[in-house]
């Protein structure tokens, strides 16, 4: 890992404000949908039994892995029980970008219908856990890149989540119409210079949210590209569209936390 990447990770860790005494537990968790097995990771502070809201976190296109669990740790802190959700299937673990691209194409083969079902199943799994200090009536979702698009599909499914959904630099394009009104509040954190999300997609998303009667926000960060929240993308060509941006990440995480505080309340 280069010095730049290590510094980026340290900066991102600082965003989480996790006290040193926090005892974060990482617990493998498996479930099925229509007979297919899925495998995720549950992350939460087990130094206290105090009940708290739950968040389904859908990772980027690399799926459930070390970087995704690290992100879940930063989000969970002492505030949330986080389920790092597997939406590919237990046997799909991309080793590189080429395999990740294949996994995404397969996942979207039916225009997002299957992803809506899998995201909803992850919500049900988190809300139905026993022996974990999660409040089943206080669930939200957050996703990154590919996962940002998945949590928007969750909103399009008509699912009503008290915590809402937050999309970090996710795909905004809906390939299938929403399944009725959009009942879950939506916060989109978007890089204004993200070439993978052209202006016409932003316009179509805005129209979709309005027509769906959604409670929605879209924040466009000037100078930010795709992957702006992911410190593992701090290296690479300067002209790459997938680029970590510490300033934008700091601002976006603050907005995410403010959104969830408003939605969940005291």
Image: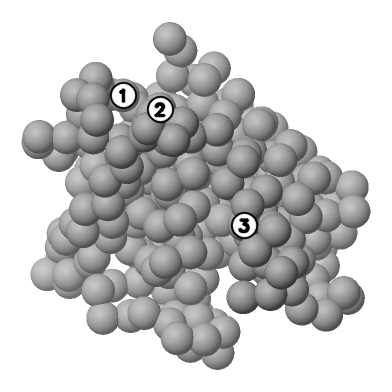
As measured in the structure, the alpha-carbon distance from the residue carrying label 2 to the one carrying label 1 is: 6 Å
Local packing at callout 1 (Cα closer than 10 Å; few below 14, some 14-19, many 20+) is some
Q: Which residue is mark 3?
A: 9
Q: Earlier in the sequence, mark 2 or mark 3?
A: 3
The residue located at (65%, 63%) in the rendering is 6
Q: Which mark is residue 52?
A: 1
Q: Tag 1, which secondary structure?
A: strand
The residue located at (44%, 35%) in the rendering is 20
As measured in the structure, the alpha-carbon distance from the residue carrying label 3 to the one carrying label 1 is: 26 Å
250 left or right of 113 in image: right
Local packing at callout 2 (Cα closer than 10 Å; few below 14, some 14-19, many 20+) is some
The C terminus sits in image quarter: top left
Q: Nearer the viewer, mark 2 or mark 3?
A: 3
Q: Quadrant of residue 124?
A: top left
The residue located at (34%, 27%) in the rendering is 53
Is residue 212 visible in the rendered image? The answer is no
Q: In the rendered view, tell whether residue 215 sits above or below residue 145.
A: above
Q: Are marks 2 and 1 in contact (CB under 8 Å)?
A: yes
Q: Tag 2, which secondary structure?
A: loop
Q: Earlier in the sequence, mark 3 or mark 1?
A: 3
The residue located at (23%, 35%) in the rendering is 46
Local packing at callout 3 (Cα closer than 10 Å; few below 14, some 14-19, many 20+) is some
Residue 261 at x, y percent in the picture: 52, 20
Q: Which residue is mark 2?
A: 79
Residue 90 at x, y percent in the picture: 25, 74
Residue 18 at x, y percent in the picture: 48, 34
83 left or right of 37 in image: right
The N terminus sits in image quarter: bottom right
């Amino acid at each position: 890992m280069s010095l730049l990447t290590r510094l980026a990770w340290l900066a991102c860790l600082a965003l989480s404000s996790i006290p040193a005494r926090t005892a974060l537990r990482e617990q493998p968790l498996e479930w099925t949908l229509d007979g297919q097995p899925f495998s995720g990771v549950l992350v939460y502070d087990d130094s206290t039994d105090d009940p708290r809201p739950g968040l389904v976190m859908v990772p980027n296109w690399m799926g459930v892995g070390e970087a995704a669990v690290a992100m879940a740790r930063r989000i969970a802190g002492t505030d949330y029980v986080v389920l790092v959700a597997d939406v590919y299937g237990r046997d799909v673990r991309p080793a590189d970008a080429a395999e990740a691209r294949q996994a995404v194409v397969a996942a979207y083969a039916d225009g997002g219908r299957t992803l809506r079902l899998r995201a909803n199943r992850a919500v049900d799994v988190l809300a139905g856990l026993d022996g974990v200090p999660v409040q089943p009536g206080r669930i939200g979702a957050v996703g990154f890149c590919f996962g940002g698009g998945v949590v928007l599909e969750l909103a399009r499914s008509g699912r009503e989540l008290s915590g809402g959904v937050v999309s970090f630099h996710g795909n905004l394009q809906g390939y299938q119409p929403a399944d009725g009104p959009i009942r879950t509040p939506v916060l989109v954190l978007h890089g204004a210079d993200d070439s993978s999300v052209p202006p016409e997609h932003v316009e179509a998303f805005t129209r979709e949210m309005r027509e769906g009667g959604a409670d929605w926000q879209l924040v466009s960060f000037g100078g930010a590209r795709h992957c702006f929240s992911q410190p593992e993308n701090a290296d690479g060509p300067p002209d790459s569209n997938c680029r970590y941006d510490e300033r934008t990440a700091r601002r976006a995480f603050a907005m995410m936390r403010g959104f969830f505080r408003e939605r969940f309340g005291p």
